[in-house]
Image: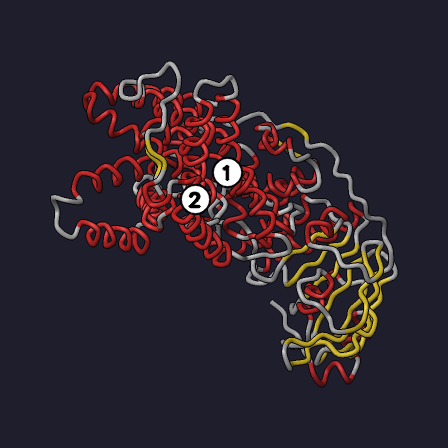
């Protein structure tokens, strides 16, 4: 709350003082760039927070500006004027949300695909705006648009734009602090991990894009009465790419970066374009340098440091509600599974059955198909034939989110943690798995959740208690353990661990062995572990499956596996 209060005071002071510094003429000019800054805030929210680069942010500003202009021309004296202008603000947000749902449905890792569609959006809008002359005015656009009733166009332009920008910045400052903002930042780093922690990643992206469109709607609705003119240039590629350049240079991951970029770079362009030769070339070079060497932008380092200073005091912990898993144990059965990628067969007539909770290890030489089994079980790869039954279902495909809610916890071979978040934020995301409703993601109190499981994990691994530590600063072993801790915080009933001790020291390995045993006993869970460290297999496994060339070579107890001649011929394993 201290950070939000500091932002409120700073934003109010700056916007109130600026007109006194620059004078009335520049204040009117500045008003336009304050509206552009509102649109850039939306782009910063979708790109900087959720990782969605939109090349068509100008569409939402232009759509709302045309809509607002038509409303003011046709209803300037009507009682319906302000309700209709409200719709002009909201409509771009709804369009963006629906478009996001259509683009993201059933897809992951589609950033380039998304950017191309948004680019096509402004090209289509520009074509419609120039050809539909009876409505849009064609190339000349809408002219002589009335101002808002009761407001002087020149004198009040800055005040209205400043109020819109100030309120927009406070909203963004708040939502960046909420669990929803944390999830967006996690989403931009590892979308698959977010899904495997039980969140609807496509819905999260659609909401971010919808809010981005809403900010474009705010800017466009005020643009029409302020300028008395709306032209197809708002749908031009130049304006939308200018938004991208401004946000990138200012700092797309921050609150002030998009605003500083829009006002600073925008005003500089407006002033220097005609007096400085090749200004666009100079700006392009600045953009390239910023992208290559200053990826955080002008404010990307300073703002987070100031924010951490305001949040330096620890807050009281609150118990998380019980997690309601829908899973009841049912046998895990893989029957006659055949899976190929292209012409390469990976799994061939694989059969694997687990009839009771416990710890089961999968071993075998590299390329035997161990990780592929996990991918087939969780739907990451689609088998050509055969069935997989688990989580109380038989042969029914579930997405990662549904599986996690049902009781699945999966740790990948490479640590899947969110480097640009803190240890506390990583653990908090895991605690939110399957617990809060959608509206709860706007409650700050979720950031302070704790659970008995997390308390025990912190006792076993003390580095987890440093909640403010950035994950990017952790060692490889600590990242592996944090990843495991996140999986266990979801309190899974089926645990899939892919080489959880890879890269760990002997002491760390022993701690992980004890933690896995503790978790299986506490949750009455089934753990399937891919592991090459035979010492760990001997310590943990109730039963061992040996794979070779995509088929089941042998299964049995550790002693039976070690004494089997066929296993000894193809696999020896290793120890630390």
* Kind of element beneath mark 2: helix
Q: How many marks?
A: 2
Task: Kindly indicate the quadrant of the structure image that contains residue 533.
Answer: bottom right
Frontmost residue, 110 versus 484: 110
Counting from the top left corner in percent of width and height, residue 319 is at 68, 29
Outermost residue to the front: 134
Q: Residue at x 26, y 39 (%)?
A: 266
Query: What is the number of the mark on residue 59?
Result: 2
Q: Characterize the local packing of mark 2: few (<14), some (14-19) or many (20 or more) Cα atoms within 10 angstroms.
A: many
Q: Nearer the viewer, residue 302 or 504?
A: 302
Could you say which disc has been placed on residue 43 in the image? Answer: none
Residue named by callout 1: 92
**Would residue 442 be visible to someone looking at this image?**
yes
Residue 228 x/y as whole percent: 32, 29
Q: What is the spatial separation of the Cα atoms under label 2 and label 1, in whole angstroms?
A: 9 Å
* Residue 3 seen: no
- Few, some or many residues within 10 Å of mark 1 (<14, 14–19, 20+): many
Relative to 564, does residue 308 appear above or below in the rendering? Answer: above
**Is the C-beta separation of discs 2 and 1 under 8 Å?**
yes
- Which quadrant, please, contains the C terminus? bottom right
Classify residue 56 as left or right of residue 346: left
Locate residue 386, reporting x and y percent: 80, 71
Q: Quadrant of residue 351?
A: bottom right
Q: Is residue 166 above or below residue 41?
A: above
- Residue 472 lies left or right of residue 207; in this view the side is left
Image point (74%, 61%), residue name:
528
Residue at position x 49%, y 35% from top? 214
- Percent across and percent down for residue 307 are 41, 32
Q: Which mark sits nearer the N-terminus, 2 or 1?
A: 2
Secondary-structure class at tag 1: helix
Q: Nearer the viewer, residue 367 or 512?
A: 367
């Amino acid at each position: 709350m201290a950070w939000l209060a500091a932002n409120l005071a700073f934003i109010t002071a700056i916007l109130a003082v600026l007109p006194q510094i620059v004078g009335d003429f520049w204040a009117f000019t500045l008003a336009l760039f304050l509206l552009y800054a509102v649109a850039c805030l939306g782009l910063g929210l979708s790109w900087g927070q959720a990782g969605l680069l939109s090349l068509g942010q100008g569409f939402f500003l232009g759509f709302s500006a045309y809509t607002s202009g038509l409303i003011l021309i046709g209803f300037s004296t009507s009682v319906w004027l302000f309700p209709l202008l409200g719709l002009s603000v909201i409509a771009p947000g709804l369009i963006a949300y629906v478009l996001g749902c259509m683009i993201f449905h059933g897809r992951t890792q589609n950033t380039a695909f998304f950017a191309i569609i948004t680019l096509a959006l402004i090209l289509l809008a520009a074509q419609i705006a120039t050809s539909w002359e009876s409505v849009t005015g064609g190339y000349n656009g809408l002219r002589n648009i009335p101002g808002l009733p009761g407001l002087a166009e020149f004198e009040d332009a800055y005040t209205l734009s400043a109020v819109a920008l100030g309120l927009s910045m406070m909203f963004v400052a708040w939502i960046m602090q909420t669990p929803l903002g944390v999830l967006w930042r996690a989403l931009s780093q590892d979308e698959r991990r977010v899904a495997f922690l039980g969140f609807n990643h496509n819905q999260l992206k659609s909401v971010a894009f919808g809010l981005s469109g809403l900010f474009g709607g705010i800017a466009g609705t005020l643009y029409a009465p302020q300028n008395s003119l709306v032209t197809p240039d708002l749908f031009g590629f130049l304006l939308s790419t200018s938004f991208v350049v401004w946000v990138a240079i200012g700092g797309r991951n921050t609150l002030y970066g998009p605003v500083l970029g829009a006002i600073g770079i925008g005003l500089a362009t407006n002033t220097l374009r005609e007096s400085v030769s090749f200004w666009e070339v100079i700006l392009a070079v600045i953009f390239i340098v910023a992208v290559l060497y200053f990826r955080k932008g002008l404010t990307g380092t300073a703002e987070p440091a100031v924010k951490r200073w305001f949040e330096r005091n620890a807050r009281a912990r609150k118990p998380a509600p019980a997690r309601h898993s829908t899973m009841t144990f049912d046998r895990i059965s893989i029957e006659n599974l055949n899976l190929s990628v292209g012409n390469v067969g990976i799994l061939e007539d694989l059969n694997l059955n687990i009839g009771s909770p416990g710890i089961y290890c999968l071993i075998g030489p590299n390329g035997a198909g161990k990780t592929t089994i996990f991918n087939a079980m969780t739907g990451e790869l689609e088998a050509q034939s055969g069935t997989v039954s688990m989580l109380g279902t038989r042969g029914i495909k579930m997405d990662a989110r549904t599986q996690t809610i049902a009781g699945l916890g999966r740790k990948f071979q490479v640590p899947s943690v969110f480097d640009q978040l803190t240890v506390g934020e990583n653990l908090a995301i895991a605690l939110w798995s399957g617990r809060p409703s959608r509206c709860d993601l706007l409650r700050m109190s979720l950031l302070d959740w704790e659970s008995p499981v997390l308390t025990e994990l912190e006792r076993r691994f003390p580095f987890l208690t440093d909640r403010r530590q950035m994950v990017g600063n952790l060692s490889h072993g600590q990242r592996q353990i944090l990843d495991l801790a996140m999986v266990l915080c979801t309190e899974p009933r089926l645990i899939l661990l892919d080489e959880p001790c890879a890269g760990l020291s002997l002491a760390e390995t022993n701690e992980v062995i004890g933690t896995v045993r503790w978790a299986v006993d506490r949750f009455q869970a089934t753990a399937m572990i891919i592991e090459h460290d035979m010492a760990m297999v001997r310590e943990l496994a109730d039963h061992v499956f040996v794979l070779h060339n995509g088929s089941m070579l042998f299964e049995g107890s550790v002693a039976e596996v070690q004494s089997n001649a066929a296993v000894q011929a193809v696999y020896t394993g290793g120890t630390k």
